[in-house]
Amino acid sequence: MLGSEVDVFSHWYHLVDGLEQSSQAFYTALAEELEARRIPDLHLSRVEFAEGAILSGKREYLRVKRKDHTFDVCAAPFGRGFFVSWWLFAVPGCIGGLPIIGAFFRRDTYYTHDTALMFQSAVHGAVTDTLDRVSAGKGIRALSEFERKPILREFGRR
């Protein structure tokens, strides 16, 4: 869902060499982990995006949503391994996205930024914990601290 209508402010990806796993099994395990964390206002769904141009195949993602913030998580075989990636973005509401007028309806506060960061931390932790658990079950090492770090963009940019 990358495009001008979204504000991407964080991304993470990792390829686990030698891991054989189905996307569906990973999404199910991740959904269970997310539900166990009792994140307030959490909504999970599956969405499909084209893998490339118009006639290309579709790829299913697990969508993790809380208020204006959304993660699209992709998990799939790649070469002789398995990768997981996520994109965290915000889509302003109908009125909040309007120039000038939107500023009156959209309040960026410490609390909104803090809860967005906590949402990122909780979901990222669930993703890495799920990946570690799946990998350990197949005899593959856990992620290092460096491999766990997401790529942050300028937070709250508008």
Image (tube, grey):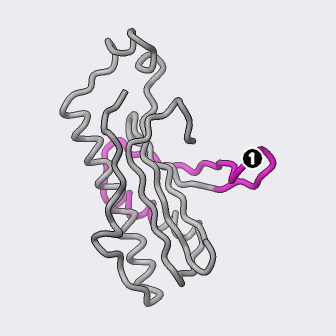
- Please tell me which residue is depicted at 57% across the width and 54% down the height of the picture: 61
Q: Residues within 10 Å of mark 1 (few under 14, many from 20)?
A: few
Residue 29 shown in magenta = no
Lateral position of residue 55 relative to residue 123, left or right: right
Q: Where in the figure is residue 135, as x and y percent of width and height?
A: 44, 81
Q: Where in the figure is residue 67, as x and y percent of width and height?
A: 38, 35
The total of numbered circles placed on residues is 1
Residue 35 shown in magenta = yes
| Relative vertical location of residue 117 with respect to residue 19 in this rendering, above or below | above
Residue at the top extreme, as displayed: 101
Residue at the bottom extreme, as displayed: 139
| Relative vertical location of residue 113 with respect to residue 57 in this rendering, above or below | above
Report the magenta residues as a range.
30-59
- Quadrant hosting residue 97: top left
- Please tell me which residue is depicted at 44% across the width and 16% down the height of the picture: 95
Q: Nearer the viewer, residue 156 or 111?
A: 156
Q: Quadrant of the C terminus?
A: top left
Residue at which label 1 appears: 53
- Please tell me which residue is depicted at 45% across the width and 62% down the height of the picture: 13
Residue at the left extreme, as displayed: 110
Q: Quadrant of the N terminus?
A: top right
Q: Where in the figure is residue 116, as x and y percent of width and height?
A: 30, 41
Kind of residue at badge 1: Ala
Lateral position of residue 143 relative to residue 135, left or right: left
Q: In terms of secondary structure, where does tag 1 sit?
A: loop
- Please tell me which residue is depicted at 27% across the width and 45% down the height of the picture: 117
Q: Where in the figure is residue 20, as x and y percent of width and height?
A: 57, 81
- Quadrant hosting residue 142: bottom left
